[in-house]
Amino acid sequence: MSKVSFIQEEMAQRNEKAVIGFWIYLMTDCVLFASLFATYAVLHKNTYGGPGSKDIFNLPYVLVETLILLTSSFSAGIATYSAYLYKKAQTVIFLIITIVLGLTFLIMELSEFSHLIRIGDSFRRSGFLSSYFALVGTHGMHILFGLIALSVLVCQIMIKGLNRNVLRRINLISMFWHFLDVVWIFIFTIVYLMGVIK
Amino acid sequence: MYLFSFLLLGRLTLKAIPSDTITRGGALLVLLAPLGLAALLTYKKKWKWLYKNWLTTLDPKKIGVMYIILASVMLVRAGVDALMMRLQQATSAGASNGFLSANHFQQVFSAHGTIMIFFVAMGLMFGLINLVVPLQIGSRDVAFPFLNSVSFWLYTAGLIIVNLSLVLGTFSIAGWLAYPPLSELKYSPGVGVDYWIWSLQIAGIGSLLSGINFIVTILKMRVKGMNLMKMPVFTWSVLGALSLVIFAFPILTATLLLLTLDRNLGTHFFTAGGGGNAMMYVNLIWAWGHPEVYILILPAFGVFSEVVATFSRKALFGYKTMVWAIWAIVLLSFTVWLHHFFTMGAGANVNAFFGIMTMIIAIPTGVKIFNWIFTMYKGRISFATPMLWFMGFVVLFTIGGVAGVIMAIPAADFQLHNSLFLVAHFHTMIVSGVLFGYFAGFTYWFPKIFGFKLNERLGKYAFWCWLVGFILAFVPLYILGMMGATRRLNHYPSGLGYQPLFIVAGIGAGIIALGVAFQVLQIGYSIYKRKEYKDTTGDPWNARTLEWSIPSPAPFYNFAKRMEVSTKDAFWEMKQRKSLDQGEYEDILVPKNSPIGMLIGFTSLAFGFAFVWHIWWLSGLSLIALISIVIYRLSQDNIESFISKDKLRKLDISRKAEG
Amino acid sequence: MNEINNSGLFEIKFKSYLIGFILSVFLTLFSYILVVRKVFSADKTILIIVITALVQFSLQLIFFLHINKKAKKSWQLSALIFMIIVVFILVFGSIWIMYNLNRRMMPTNAQVNNYLKSQGGGGI
């Protein structure tokens, strides 16, 4: 076996290990979110005289957030697809679209938070609001880290081109981004939609 | 001035330096030990050697050794805590108040529990996993060597934070699991609980990463032909334990995060007022905590499976039932957590469900015990030290297990909850199960890592001291629990008849300390006699699994040739068929050493320390530094060196000539 | 060149992203409209939107996260199933335990009053 083909085989194995390793990490993150969901489920009636979920949620606003995040998940997928076709410019463009959409989502979420804090319904107000801020805020933190990772990735593509390592990272980061969208499905349904019904 | 000091140092002031003699002594020891070590290194001009060969290494074997060294130091540290508690309880009856204040006593038992679980048991476990798993599955490395070093250094950072609490400020007084509302800001305003939170949070993330790493290693890097049902049982048990790690530790991370928010941002998760619910903390922490005890015990079960088969000269009885028992335990361990708080007030239906589940989980454990005993049956048993640890374990563990089943009955638990009976029960499980298991494993695999065997006679002395000491130390606690003595007593009236039993328990603890001394002596003496005890064959115990097919100490590339196996107990089969040393040499990639794991560890340490003391500029700075370091590492390209098969052949041949 | 670099990574098709995206948008809007227009009673709506969420979850797993036959071979599916079991036990176990505890251990003032009165004493 020549050195080149040996390294190629090694890289294929490395990709496989990275994908399963990262996937297992995502599974652990699901359990983290599950703990926060459980806390929300237990505490969401503890309003302590403060507002309940029905009083503070603005559903149309959240729907826009949801659709933006969903679109960014789609564009992350397209970026990966473009990377597979070795279209560097297209990859970068779609990654930047993902970043912009993600940033919009994050800003919308933060302005929702700051609105709540301004009108006195901060995380200090009640057990319900604490658990709401913790659950949605942890998702937001993940989005923030995802944005940092996406930005670094864009820089790496610009500098190094679409080499093996970069290609692997595009795969992993888009997995991460899709995963955040999957978690958001449950936040949208359980926290926002169900919160408004009852 | 005050504002300036607050901005610069947060709440860290001169008052943080301990004022009473006992704490000062501890602080001095914590400071002097590393300083003394540093002086010795400087004197011997070994810094470069230490840095190049150990601190920056990505070799799992060396990382494993570092884990075990730190865990052993922590065993002594937390063992001193135990001796202090025993001394206090033996002397503090009636008019006498003992030598520890109530507050200090609380710190001591909190530190003892925290350190023993997170930094001794977990450290020894990850140490052994690092040493053995890649070798046992015929792999050259772990799946993510760099991540492995990060895990180790995060563990170290957590360990340093816990020990810093001796030097600056105080430790938590809220017990090893820091139940709120006591651990909330209102009732624990100092830094103690923060020290506890951050040491666990950082070390816990390290464990989580390590869990992912070794699961991928086991799933993806087995030698050709070793399908799952041919894996050694130790590897199986590690896979089971780490599956628990990856699904239980995120719960701990979340719980600690919520407690941090309560303490720092004024949220109301577990507070007494404001719509918080302290019972939710207890619920969450045990949803992690119960799997945690199985995380610790499963690899020890794996060690015993290897030890029993090797020293009975027989294949393990019931391999398949063993594997299924492991997975039954893995799954069931997520369904029993309420038995830690039967008395919190859940209804009879809830308590009954968790009581029954607890009894059910005893069944697969019983299956394992019988499998080991049947393995010994008609075997040619040699009573080497690892085997002695095993036999001590079987006896004690069964007693402790029966005590556990008694407490699984909710009605009985209402009497025994938080009594010394409980303390005696879980110490029987963890000392005889976990510690004895890792001691057995350490003695068993020691020659593979260091190239020489440990002295048997001193090892046996250590074992007998541990066994006798353990019985003397904990049987009285069972009785005391029945008599109504609660845990965490720093003082009791003299007329209750407790004192004689506490004195016996104290003597027992002293004998255990003697056992530890013998272990230290054993290692020292064996190093001194290392030429005499040299393992020239690579297979000193006539063992069964692949790690014994290579020379001792294991070379950095583990296996020179690409092998293929066809049965379980692959090495034993090879020996029977006399088909050793098969396979071809091949090119390999070896990861280059990297100081970045250490850097990440110390940056996390700075982050945690800054958070404890509210030095906000430092925590912000270290967070930014942490992200930058990770990005820097991800941008490095040339991170491994290539070793051609010719070079590997030369290395291998010269290695074998030496052996 | 292409094949060598992708080996060990996912196979990716544009079509699967598109299908996943369209279906997810549709399901999101469906749940939203159901809640806003109050088409059904509260309990029925909750049931339907939870099912919708689970469907969308599976769709995104298949179309965005590439959970397919290959995933079964590479342990992704096993890890996923294990995670779902643990999450199920954790969330529903916690809810079961905590609601039971809350009912028994954290009564409201009114409940305490009623209890005390039923025992023949005065309220608080």
Image (cartoon, coloured by chain):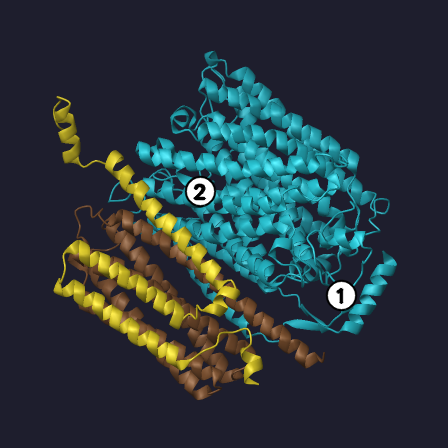
Chain colours: A brown, B cyan, C yellow
Q: Which residue is mark 2?
A: B192
Location of residue B134 (image quadrant): bottom right
At numbered mark 2, what does the secondary structure look like: helix, strand or loop?
A: helix
Give the mark nearer the N terminus: 2 vs 1: 2
**Which sits in the foreground, B529 or B658?**
B658
Identify the chain of the residue marked 1, using the numbered disc in the image.
B
Q: Pick the quarter of the image with the N terminus of chain C.
A: bottom right
B271 on left or right of C119? right
Q: Amino acid at mark 1?
A: Lys
Would you identify the image quadrant in which residue C3 lies?
bottom right
In this view of the protein, which residue sits in the foreground, B436 or B228? Answer: B228
**Pointer 2 chain:** B
Q: The residue under label 2 is which amino acid type?
A: Gly
When the figure is inspected, residue B631 is found, relative to residue B173, above or below; the finding is below
Picture disc at residue B553? none
On residue B561, which mark appears?
1
Q: Position of residue A130 (x, y in %)?
A: 28, 52
Q: Secondary structure at mark 1?
A: strand
Task: Note whether residue A63 is visible.
Answer: yes
- Left or right, B340 with reference to B296: left
**Same chain assignment for discs 2 and 1:** yes
Q: Position of residue A58 (x, y in %)?
A: 18, 64
Question: Is B283 situated above or below B86?
Answer: below
Disc 2 to disc 1, C-alpha distance: 52 Å
Q: Mark 2 or 1, which is nearer the eye? A: 1
Q: Position of residue A179 (x, y in %)?
A: 39, 66
